């Protein structure tokens, strides 16, 4: 049931582009997240729909487009006449589809206001992601009905340049026959790309006469590229050639922290799976933190040392409870154990005075922390808000430097609930190509709730202490960045994948087949 809204409704025909949510235009995004009723086509990928639903009004209605163009137009007009903002979300560009054009024409005959928001065409967009240039004379088309294709024009374009068609996989035989009947050389190079711009995009090279056999296993919409540009796919196919493309990577972090790491992994082509291993909860007795916050405001501390983003968040949550802000932190210097923690501090309007330039760990921080000087430091106390399970290394080191330390429990870390059975099975059976550990607790808790990762899974750790814990639990550490930060950890894993690919490429074919290296990188050379 649609909602009733006072005022005049509107209709928008919005192009979803080729599938990657990042390719939505700003105008399309704005229209979708403010819509009341979204009617979507079956060729709009589920990941894109999920991304839109996550940002849309919780009360917005989403429904598939069903029936003839006139039926869809009636649904849109009914919603708009009820005062709602109605959208027909279309894969690619709206006016590239004959059926959508008929809907626009039907709406245009009424007094209901409408707009058409263009999107990147599926054929052209996927060709670019597949690394097939379409310069000069070309034909690109998002095909709904093979019978409507002007194969003579396609053949002319292929003879002088390149062409790209977005079609249903089940229509490839009809496309092949149409091309051959129009005089296209059977040996013309072809690339077929499925799940275009998606996480599992895959391209297969062939020729016109054998392209149906080359597309076995493809389903849904595929993009067919023909002509001279196909030869450049191996060098220009940037999407599928990213270092971690196709790698399933386990991210055992809290829900709040996993997002940033997952985004970095996706940028390298990985498919992250977030499995919370710890949950962050307030301390059982808040009295310590209450005294610490009062001490910060009263000038009791010369320094506050933050060792994690969770500690920063815990302090600022307490500030918010008492109506305080960054101004009440005046006069207190801030040290951070690493860049990620420092970035969280900056997010609250404070610039840290000290971040280790070398090893971003307790030892690295202590190496650069100044000893207490009674003349230069009239206030000789340091606030150290941390987790309940934190080690004593930092507190002991600061004490040795002459500082008085208030080691305060700012938050508790507790083991999260076990992940679903299919995730546990994948962890133990080698279903993940890599796992990234960002702390010793993530190692302990993952093993505790889901079991040890399989021996073929690449193990990447953020620093030496995490590495020691991994070894203690019988894991082989494959990757450790020079600096302990999430960006460096992801980059180190990407570099490791590139090294694997180079080693495998240098192997004779027989050795590749016998190689113990697993994952997508190895499979490409088999």
Image (cartoon, rainbow, N blue to C red):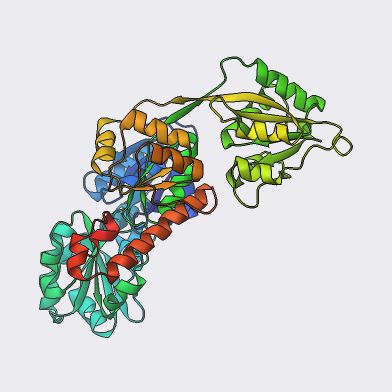
Q: Is residue 287 visible?
A: yes
* Quadrant that contains the N terminus: top left
Image quarter for residue 436?
top left
Q: Nearer the viewer, residue 71 or 150?
A: 150
Residue at far bottom of view: 160
The answer to whether residue 79 is above or below residue 198 is: above
Q: Nearer the viewer, residue 363 or 309?
A: 363
Image quarter for residue 226?
bottom left
x, y (%) of residue 144?
22, 59
Q: Nearer the viewer, residue 251 or 361?
A: 361
x, y (%) of residue 192?
22, 66
x, y (%) of residue 89?
35, 49
Residue in the picture at 11% in, 74% down: 209
Residue in the picture at 31% in, 47% down: 457
x, y (%) of residue 27?
48, 53
Residue in the picture at 66% in, 15% down: 287
The answer to whether residue 521 is above or below residue 281 is: below
């Amino acid at each position: 049931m649609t909602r009733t809204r006072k005022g005049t409704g509107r209709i928008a025909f919005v192009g979803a582009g080729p599938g990657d949510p990042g390719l939505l235009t700003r105008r399309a995004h704005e229209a979708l997240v403010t819509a009341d009723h979204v009617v979507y086509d079956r060729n709009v990928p589920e990941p894109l729909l999920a991304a839109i639903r996550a940002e849309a009004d919780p009360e917005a209605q989403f429904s598939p487009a069903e029936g003839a163009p006139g039926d869809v137009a009636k649904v849109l007009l009914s919603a708009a006449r009820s005062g709602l903002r109605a959208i027909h979300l279309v894969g690619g560009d709206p006016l590239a589809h004959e059926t959508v054009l008929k809907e626009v024409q039907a709406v245009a005959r009424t007094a209901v206001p409408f707009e058409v928001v263009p999107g990147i065409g599926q054929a052209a967009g996927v060709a670019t992601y597949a690394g097939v240039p379409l310069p000069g004379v070309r034909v690109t088309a998002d095909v709904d009905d093979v019978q409507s294709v002007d194969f003579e024009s396609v053949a002319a374009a292929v003879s002088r340049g390149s062409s790209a068609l977005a079609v249903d996989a089940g229509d490839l035989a009809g496309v092949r026959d149409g091309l051959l009947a129009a005089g296209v050389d059977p040996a013309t190079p072809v690339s077929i790309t499925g799940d275009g711009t998606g996480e599992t995009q895959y391209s297969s090279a062939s020729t016109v006469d054998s392209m149906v056999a080359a597309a076995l296993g493809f389903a849904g919409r595929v993009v067919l590229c023909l002509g001279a540009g196909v030869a450049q796919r191996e060098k220009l196919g940037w999407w599928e050639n990213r270092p971690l493309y196709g790698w399933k990577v386990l991210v055992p972090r809290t829900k709040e922290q996993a997002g940033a790491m997952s985004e970095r992994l996706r940028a390298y082509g990985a498919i992250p799976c977030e499995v919370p291993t710890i949950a962050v909860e307030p301390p059982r007795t808040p009295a310590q933190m209450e005294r610490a916050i009062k001490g910060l405001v009263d000038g009791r501390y010369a320094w506050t040392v933050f060792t994690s983003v969770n500690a920063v968040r815990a302090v600022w949550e307490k500030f918010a409870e008492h109506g305080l802000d960054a101004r009440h932190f005046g006069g207190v210097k801030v040290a951070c154990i690493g860049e990620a923690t420092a970035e969280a501090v900056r997010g609250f309007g404070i610039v840290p005075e000290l971040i280790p330039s070398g090893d971003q760990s307790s030892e690295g921080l202590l190496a650069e922390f100044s000893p207490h000087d009674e003349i230069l430091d009239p206030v000789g106390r340091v606030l150290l808000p941390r987790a309940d399970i934190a080690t004593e290394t930092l507190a002991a080191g600061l004490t040795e430097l002459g500082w008085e330390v208030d080691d305060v429990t700012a938050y508790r870390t507790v083991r999260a609930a076990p992940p679903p059975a299919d995730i546990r099975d994948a962890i133990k059976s080698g279903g993940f190509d890599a796992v990234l550990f960002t702390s010793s607790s993530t190692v302990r808790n993952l093993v505790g709730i889901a079991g040890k990762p399989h021996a073929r899974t690449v193990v990447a750790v953020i620093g030496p202490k995490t590495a020691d814990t991994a070894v203690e639990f019988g894991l082989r550490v494959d990757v450790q960045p020079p600096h302990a930060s999430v960006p460096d950890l992801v980059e180190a894993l990407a570099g490791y994948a590139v090294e694997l690919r180079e080693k495998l490429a240098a192997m004779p074919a027989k050795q590749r087949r016998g190689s113990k290296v697993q994952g997508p990188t190895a499979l490409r050379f088999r």
